[in-house]
């Protein structure tokens, strides 16, 4: 997107109808597109934490007694499950604080920090478990298959219950989704562990325990990478994956009185809260306020973007003469990237 000068001074002075201060729309009703109240989220996460924490303590004891790396790896993963839920609960409280002082958006990105911490934890833990599993493939210890199978079956029940609790919370939040991915990966791990316990019990093939651990590792790597990638996009202020900034610029330029859209930026403040800013050039005889309201309506209705900052100027005759498709305007001073012009990309 272009990064031309904000404001109308480069145009030779502001027009009397320019929107003198940047307009923020939807900060009251569109700040959180959440379907579940924060209190409900915290309640479901707390129930899941109690389930996970209780079973984790039991599993550590059983894993040591049974000599099962698969059980101990599941217990280690459940520790990260519990930590992820605690992080999610703390992040929710921080994100709920109102904006003040130098934190003009509040602490909403604490949720994204939590999601990234969850993803990094999954990646680091998976590397450690992979190392241990490889050693056990080379020199498999004795494993009590019956104890492993019984514990894993109970773990499946516990994780199904915990996953159900988190599914009742708002999974559009990357913070909650991070905790959910931890629980879901652990559920798959317990299924693999139960299978390995049955194999050891029936055939005496002790390496099945290490193989089950490697299956858990693959699942952890997949979930961890997904969380780190998604949270990284937010921190790097990339546009949400479901929004194409070029398409948004073209759509805005297609508005009846729009001449050019440039300096367009789309980013996420936090999960479910997308922001957009742009410099809009309107036709000389257009009502700038009406155009701004029309663009805000388009952005909200078609792209669910409710936090908008649109600066609207009237285009000069010189600009209109230069508004050929694909050209950059020297009057924008320092602009880079693509400007969206009337009739150039409209669809």
Image: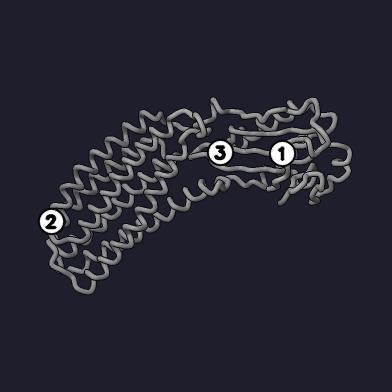
- Tell me residue 151's x, y (percent): 17, 52
Q: Which residue is mark 2?
A: 147
SS type, badge 2? helix
For mark 3, give the secondary structure.
strand
Above/below status of 202 relative to 147: below
Residue 254, position as x, y percentages in the image: 75, 39
Q: Residues within 10 Å of mark 3 (few under 14, many from 20)?
A: many
Residue at horizontal 68 percent and vertical 39 percent from the top: 278
What is the quadrant of residue 257 in the picture? Answer: top right
Q: Nearer the viewer, mark 3 or mark 2?
A: 3
Residue ID at (36%, 28%) = 39
Q: Which residue is mark 1?
A: 6
Q: Secondary structure at mark 1?
A: loop
In front: 302, or 140?
Answer: 140
Few, some or many residues within 10 Å of mark 2 (<14, 14–19, 20+):
many
Q: Residue at 59% across / 33% down in the picture?
A: 307
Q: Say whether residue 156 is visible.
A: yes
Q: Which residue is mark 3?
A: 274
How far separated are the C-alphas under marks 3 and 1? 21 Å
Q: Is residue 257 visible?
A: no
Q: Tell me which label, 1 or 2, sits earlier in the chain.
A: 1
Q: Of 303 and 272, which appears nearest the observer? A: 272
Task: Measure the alpha-carbon separation of dots 3 and 2.
Answer: 49 Å
């Amino acid at each position: 997107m272009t990064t031309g000068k904000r404001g109308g001074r480069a145009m030779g002075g502001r027009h009397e109808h320019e929107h003198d201060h940047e307009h923020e729309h939807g900060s009251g009703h569109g700040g959180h597109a959440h379907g579940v109240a924060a209190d409900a989220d915290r309640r479901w996460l707390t129930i899941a934490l109690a389930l996970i924490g209780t079973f984790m303590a039991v599993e550590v004891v059983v894993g040591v007694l049974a000599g099962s790396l698969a059980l101990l790896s599941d217990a280690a993963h459940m520790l990260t499950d519990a930590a992820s839920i605690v992080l999610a609960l703390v992040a929710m409280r921080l994100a709920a604080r109102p904006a003040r002082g130098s934190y003009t958006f509040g602490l909403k990105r604490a949720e994204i920090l939590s999601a990234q911490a969850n993803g990094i934890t999954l990646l680091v833990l998976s590397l450690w478990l992979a190392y241990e599993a490889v050693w056990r493939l080379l020199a498999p210890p004795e494993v009590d298959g019956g104890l492993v199978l019984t514990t894993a079956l109970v773990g499946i029940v516990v994780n199904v219950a915990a996953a159900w609790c988190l599914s009742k919370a708002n999974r559009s939040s990357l913070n909650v989704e991070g905790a959910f991915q931890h629980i879901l990966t652990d559920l798959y791990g317990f299924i693999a562990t139960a299978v390995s316990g049955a194999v050891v019990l029936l055939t005496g093939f002790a390496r099945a325990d290490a193989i089950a651990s490697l299956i858990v590792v693959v699942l952890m790597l997949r979930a961890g990478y997904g969380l780190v990638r998604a949270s990284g996009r937010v921190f790097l202020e990339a546009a949400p994956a479901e929004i194409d900034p070029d398409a948004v610029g073209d759509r805005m330029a297609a508005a009846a009185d729009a001449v050019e859209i440039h300096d367009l930026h789309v980013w996420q403040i936090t999960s479910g809260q997308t922001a957009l800013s742009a410099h809009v050039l309107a036709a000389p005889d257009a009502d700038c306020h009406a155009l701004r309201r029309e663009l805000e309506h388009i952005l909200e209705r078609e792209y669910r973007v409710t936090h908008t900052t649109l600066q609207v100027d009237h285009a000069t005759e010189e600009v209109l003469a230069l508004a050929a498709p694909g050209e950059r305007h020297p009057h924008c001073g320092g602009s880079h990237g693509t400007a969206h012009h009337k009739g150039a990309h409209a669809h």
